[in-house]
Image (tube, grey):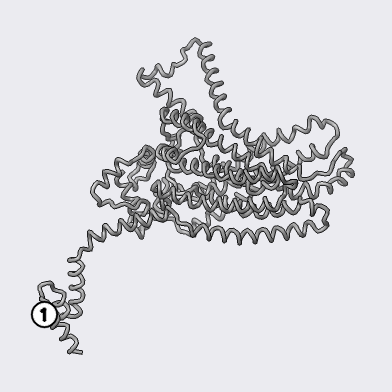
Amino acid sequence: MIISRVHDWLTGVRIVDIDEPGAIAAASNALTESERLRLIHDIITGTVEDGGATIVPGHDPYVESILPLHDLQFDKSWIHTWSTKWLIEEEDFKKIRDHYGEKIGYYFAFLQFYFLSLIPPSVIGVLVYLFSSNSYSVFFSSCMVIWSIIFTSLWERRERELAVQWGTRHHSKAERRRAAFRGETTTTDTITGDTVPHVPVWKTWVRRLTSVPGIVMGAAGLSIVVSLVFTLELFLKEYYKGPLHGVLIFAPTIMYSALIPTISGFYIRWSRYLNEWENHRTETEYEDALVHKIFITNFLTGYLSLFFIAWLYIPFGDAVLPYLTLANITHEHKPVGSERLKAQLMYFVITGQIINAATEVVVPYLTRFAFGEAKVIQERIKGEKVHDEGEADKVDEAAFMKQVRGEVALREYDVYEDYAEMIVQFGYVSMFSTVWPLTPLCCLLNNWVELRSDAVKLSKHTRRPIPARAESIGPWLDYLNLLTWFSSITTSSLAYLFSPNTAASVYTPVFALFSVFIGEHLFIAVRYLITSLLSLLPSRADEVIRRQEYSLKKRWLDKVAGAKQLVDGVATVEGEKQPGLAKFWEAKHEEEEGVELIRASFKSK
């Protein structure tokens, strides 16, 4: 533990004076449960060079997984506390960080920040919905783009404050290497002097570049399947009225339920394989690269159908009718307007989020209950006792082993699934709220429930994750900024395409592109203005860092730069250059002798 804290101090993660009396004891007493579990896990899975045992699941044939057990009392108190509060407090997030680690703490802190940030656009959206006849309002579209810029900028400041408050600033720069990292040679670290595994930079980039075609092919395959299924759904619902229409209309839903999860799962496994092949040095590098690959699936499944409707189906849907007539296909197609796009968006932000919440919390509970009852009935039929496994153990260990078996049977918790869900939802709010102004309100209500349902999912329906450190939400902030930029394109194009004033214009495609061009450039200017103004506001994180660094430097200066040492050092150096000055700096010389030396030095010139 002390070695870990000293390592943090050397690499700039923590700014404390380890030479200060009681600093080591205070650090030991301040060790949280998440830090203890993380250090134990590092010892088990770390490399031999780092003092670890190199026992890694997936690489050791006898180890399937390593997991800590849930603290049932803590989880019970956690669920009770959060279920009785309208608003989660700062101290509650600190408890989550102390128990589950910074990575989990960051997720819940982000979700709370996002939830509160949705209040202003929700209020504006309700007013626009009630008092404006035009959903595609330029005013509301502009408000959503500005809100997105402010939200991402303020969260960036907030995560820096948490990094300082939780003591994880610069953590990624000091992170130890993965046990799975395979070095081709060894080299000497220019900073620490340690011998470390090494892979040439050019080989690292070759591996990463050669994985790009694999990702592109996987994304293209998923895009084709999603497009085909959605096109079939539109055709059967909007065009086809022939034989077996009542039966065939359910085919797209069945295909989507069967194909999309299967192909998405294959793509994720393929992404993990490529990520392993890229041979990342640290866990942060590995996870960031994996997020970049996996988010493609979330982007395609979340937004592709909306883009298809807005930019292809509504503008060019009538162009399909002559081809259907030539093919002798019975059809009853009516002109489709922006209501079709609104219906699809409402499905995602209402029905889709309800289904997702039920899948995360209700379905796992019912599944475990059903399997538990089935096991009880099966054992009764066989005439066996319900807890035969526990009887094989000592009586005082039966409850413990029951908990172990129960938690091992659970699936692993993946915080990136929850992040992906929230980032995709942010895309609905920032890019498509102009379609339906109540989108922010629906997401606001959903996220109040999401905060608590995710707590239940983590504590009841998944394994307890290994505590991991984090200094931010990682690459998800990059995707927030990307979607914010993309919102300037979608909102400007939708506001022009579906505005009542431009519906009959023959120049709509040209002016739509022009509106995108203007909107995107205005976005750049507004973003620069907002970020510049926010940078002028004092940051608590920067203030704390400056205060800690100043205090540390001042203490060390007082220790090593006393007045006598400073004078002696100056006298030694200058005395070698000018022997006369050496006598001047000696404390034993009287004032008159010093004056004479100065006069003599002037006369010699």
Is residue 229 something one can see in this rendering?
no
Using the image as rendered, state which of residue 370 and residue 365 is in the foreground: 365
Indicate the position of residue 553 as horizontal and vertical percent values.
30, 59
Dot 1, how many residues are within 10 Å of its Cα: few (below 14), some (14-19), or many (20+)?
few
Q: Where is residue 292 drawn, in percent x and y?
A: 56, 49
Q: Residue at x 17, y 89 (%)?
A: 603
The image quarter containing residue 234 is top right
The number of numbered discs placed on residues in the rendered structure image is: 1
Could you tell me if residue 420 is visible in this image? yes
For the N terminus, the image quarter is top left
Left or right side of 356 for 406 = left
Q: Residue at x 18, y 89 (%)?
A: 604
Q: Position of residue 319 (x, y in %)?
A: 84, 49
Q: Secondary structure at mark 1?
A: helix
Image coordinates for residue 72, horizontal then vertical, percent? 42, 28
Q: Report the front residue among 557 and 8.
A: 557
Q: Quarter holding the C terminus? A: bottom left
Q: Is residue 449 above or below residue 298?
A: above
**Nearer to the camera, 62 or 251:** 251
Residue 99 position by quadrant = top left
Residue wearing tag 1: 592
Instruction: Indicate the amino acid at tag 1.
Output: Glu
